[in-house]
């Protein structure tokens, strides 16, 4: 490892590897309107600036560009698009923290993780629907927009000791957002959906808000989560309703809220249905829950919530 007189010893190799990852992911320009091709026109100089500023502790992220994406259900989802250079800087930090954080995540967390996909989540859920008749299905309303910074940083500091990674994570959380009309929005909560480091931070937040809480308070109920969407398998409708109420209270403690229309109790199958399906050998029943799971592949794809 090459040692410099900088406050933080960041290898130049990390910055170059981060650039290659950002290039492979493509993505739009940020507030500076610089494309990846324009960034590459002076690749060596641009990468050196990122390395030099990050190593010196003087890297301050620019605002993210707000991009409105229409939702299928109506309304808009606001993505926060960082500049190309900032995506490289975020990727440097992601490369450092992901090998530390991902191993602590539980097996039934599937979103934005290496070697896990929405298809894996669909598969395990379909198997469990044969064993549990009821599902408490939930969606977090605006997860990326409402993550509590204090709670998130408490979780980050519990696992990450790298000082410069902590420094820049805090700065990214506070970076403002610029709307299409030029209006600047200061941010006191949330992490931009569209940022390179945002998915793993959101996963860490949900790890403690939901995953660990479920393992501690309801160890007998299997669950599955993909980012801000999840479900819990239950044995009876009463159990599903009780779980929904308990989860609502838990999320409120973490300053989160269930989506009022996307959160529901679903009957997967009845014993008679299960018996008939097996007898006819026509495959899984076409219950509302299973239809959503079966159509998830074509509707959402592996990078989006899967029900």
Image (cartoon, grey):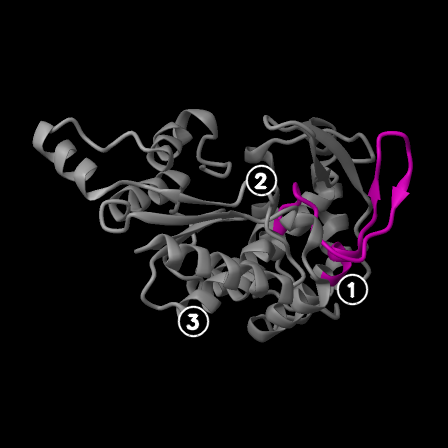
Question: Mark 2 Cα within 10 Å, few/some/many (few <14, many 20+)?
Answer: few
Secondary structure type for disc 1 = loop
Camera-side mark, 1 or 3: 3
Mark drawn on residue 57 = 1
Query: Which quarter of the figure is the N terminus placed in?
Result: bottom right
Q: Are marks 1 and 3 in contact (CB under 8 Å)?
A: no
Compared with 216, 70 (above or below) is above
Disc 1/disc 3 C-alpha distance (Å) = 42 Å
- Indicate left or right for 228 with 35 as reference: left
Q: Looking at the picture, how far across and down is residue 111, in whole percent?
A: 47, 47
105 relative position to 283: left or right: right
Residue 267 pos. (x, y %): 35, 42
Residue 45 vertical position relative to residue 70 in the rendered view, above or below: below
Position of 33 relative to 217 (above/below): above
Sequence-first disc among 3 and 2 = 3
Residue drawn at 61 percent across, 68 percent down: 156
Within 10 angstroms of label 3, few (less than 14), some, or many (20 or more) residues? few
Pointer 3 residue: 217
Dividing the picture into quarters, in which one does residue 301 lie?
A: top left
Residue that mark 2 sits on: 261
Q: Nearer the viewer, residue 280 or 7?
A: 280
Residue 48 at x, y percent in the picture: 73, 49
Q: Tell me the residue at 75%/57% (across/down).
A: 189
Label 3: element kind = helix
Q: Which residues are magenta?
A: 170-198
Residues packed near mark 1 inside 10 Å, few (<14), some (14 to 19) or many (20 plus): some
């Amino acid at each position: 490892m090459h040692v410099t007189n900088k406050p933080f010893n960041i290898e130049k190799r990390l910055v170059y590897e981060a650039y290659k990852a950002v290039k492979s992911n493509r993505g739009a320009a940020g507030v500076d309107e610089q494309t990846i091709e324009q960034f590459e026109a002076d690749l060596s100089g641009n990468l050196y600036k990122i390395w030099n500023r990050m190593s010196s502790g003087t890297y301050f992220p620019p605002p993210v560009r707000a991009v409105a994406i229409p939702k299928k259900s109506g309304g808009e989802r606001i993505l926060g698009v960082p500049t190309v250079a900032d995506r490289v800087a975020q990727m440097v930090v992601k490369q450092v923290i992901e090998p530390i954080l991902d191993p602590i995540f539980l097996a039934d967390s599937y979103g934005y993780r290496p070697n896990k996909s929405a298809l894996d989540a669909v598969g395990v859920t379909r198997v469990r629907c044969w064993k549990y008749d009821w599902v408490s299905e939930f969606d977090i309303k605006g997860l990326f927009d409402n993550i509590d910074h204090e709670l998130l940083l408490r979780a980050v500091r519990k696992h990450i000791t790298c000082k410069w990674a902590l420094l820049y994570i805090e700065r990214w959380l506070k970076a403002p957002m610029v709307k299409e009309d030029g209006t600047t929005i200061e941010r006191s909560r949330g992490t931009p959906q569209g940022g390179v480091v945002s998915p793993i931070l959101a996963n860490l937040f949900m790890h403690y808000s939901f995953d660990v809480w479920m393992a501690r308070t309801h160890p007998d109920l299997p669950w599955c989560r993909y980012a801000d969407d999840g479900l819990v398998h239950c044995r009876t409708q009463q159990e599903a309703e009780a779980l929904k109420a308990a989860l609502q209270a838990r999320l409120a403690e973490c300053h989160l809220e269930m989506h009022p229309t996307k959160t529901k109790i679903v009957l997967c199958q009845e014993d008679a249905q299960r018996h008939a399906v097996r007898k006819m050998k026509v495959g899984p029943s076409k219950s509302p829950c299973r239809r959503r799971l079966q159509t998830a592949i074509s509707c959402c794809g592996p990078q989006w919530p899967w029900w």
